[in-house]
Amino acid sequence: MRDDAHQPAESFGNEFTDYLVGLPWTSVADKGAIMDEIWCRPGKTGIIILLVGLHWQAVYSGAGKKWASNIERVQTIFDAILEVPSL
């Protein structure tokens, strides 16, 4: 990155957890529907934000129980992507 990013606040961990919990989990359970979600696309605002969010949460908010739960949530999302029949 050429832009210097500011380190997220310590509250980022809670905010990221709220974001993940608020995702439409019904689309994760429905094979193929996950690919219709805007956050499941390539690019800066797509699926990469899940990995960056996990990293920031671990580094800046502590890798505690919420982080471990978020790892499982993101794993569930990736597993659902891999199960899409058209891929």
Image (spheres, rainbow, N blue to C red):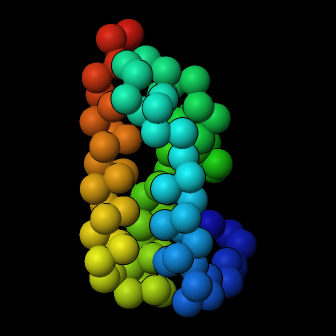
Q: Residue at x 36, y 62 (%)?
A: 70
Q: Residue at x 58, y 85 (%)?
A: 11
The x and y percentages for residue 29 are 37, 29
Q: Residue 64: in sight, yes or no?
A: yes
Q: Residue 42: in sight, yes or no?
A: no
- The reply, left or right, for residue 29 in relation to residue 75 is right
Look at the image and tell me in which quarter the N terminus lies: bottom right
Q: Residue at x 59, y 31 (%)?
A: 37
- The reply, left or right, for residue 59 in relation to residue 38 is left
The x and y percentages for residue 62 are 38, 87
- With respect to residue 51, does 75 lie above or below? above
The x and y percentages for residue 7 are 61, 85
The x and y percentages for residue 82 are 29, 28
- The reply, left or right, for residue 43 in relation to residue 59 is right
Q: Residue at x 42, y 33 (%)?
A: 28
Look at the image and tell me in which quarter the C terminus lies: top left
- With respect to residue 10, does 23 lie above or below? above
- With respect to residue 24, does 60 lie above or below? below
